[in-house]
Image (cartoon, rainbow, N blue to C red):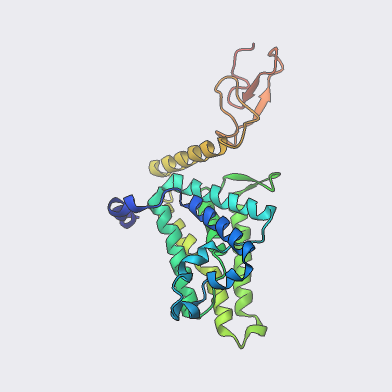
Amino acid sequence: MKFLNKMEKTFGRFAIKNLMLYVIVINIIGIFATLIEPNLVNSLYFNPVAFLNGEVWRIFTVAFMPTTEVGLLMGLILYFYYWVGSSIENTIGSFKFNVYYFSGYLLTIIVSLLTSFPVENLGYLNLSIFLAFAALAPNHTVLLFFILPVKMKYLALFDVVLQLYIAVGAIFNKSLAAFPSIRYGLAMTVLVPLINAGIFALLFRSGRGLSKNNKQRRFEKEFRQQMAHNQSKTYEPKHRCTVCGRTEVDDESLEFRFCSKCEGNYEYCSDHLFNHEHK
């Protein structure tokens, strides 16, 4: 953590601000380019053999490769990537987020070169941002499919189990026994972003202490405030306390009730339901 802080003082001015916006724009460009010319895919993804034979552009163009089929799901995934990534960047700073993302990018390329396994897109890396977010705010609630409220830690647990299943399945896949580069290449391509997210989580949580000291409480408070600010841009609160003005966006644990003795639709939080002047 101290090492990153020192690096930030020296190189922080070179950090790409709002990095996820550029990632999303690059994906959109890649989507339209491959729709117009489908054969372009063969020249854009990272093929380690072709790269070593002089096609050095592949180390950059793999970032343009879309991670899913064109449609509503693609739009939701890109929006989710942007929301999660920008939330982390707003909390820890552009430089540290750049370090996290590009270290995962570099590790993915290195694994591809070592195993000769091609990288079709950076889907696993982009998905790992979600795991980093869950490590910083495990109790933050999102609406799954815009309907079901689920805490980030449970979504992260499901994602980790799924990716481990893919990695372990690739290693023990008997049909790929004659192709060790595919077996281990696929497994490592899945695992490397997970490892990168784990290192990130350890750095930032240990850097602030695992105990509930003042520094940890201040970090958690600032993160919740930042998340509330980000969420309030797209979410209109349904409840607001007449006394203190707090909403469910400010504190997800608050409960709101109407007072039967007040004349009118006056709503109060749990702290002021029995502690207010009746109107």
Residue at the spot x=53%, y=53% of the render? 25
Q: Quadrant of the N terminus?
A: bottom left
Name the quadrant containing residue 131: bottom right
Residue that protrudes farthest toward the bottom in the picture: 178
Residue that protrudes farthest toward the front in the picture: 36
Residue nearer the viewer, 42 or 222: 42
Relative horizontal placement of residue 113, taking residue 75 as reference (left or right):
left
Residue 53 vs 46, above or below: the answer is below
Residue at the spot x=70%, y=14% of the render? 264
Residue at the spot x=63%, y=80% of the render? 172
The image position of residue 30, as x and y in percent, is 56, 61
Residue nearer the viewer, 169 or 273: 169
The image position of residue 195, as x and y in percent, is 49, 65
Relative horizontal placement of residue 211, taking residue 169 as reference (left or right):
left
Q: Quadrant of the C terminus?
A: top right
Q: Is residue 223 visible?
A: yes
The image position of residue 278, as x and y in percent, is 64, 12
Residue 61 vs 258, above or below: the answer is below
Relative horizontal placement of residue 3, taking residue 136 as reference (left or right):
left
Name the quadrant containing residue 249: top right
Residue at the spot x=54%, y=53% of the render? 24
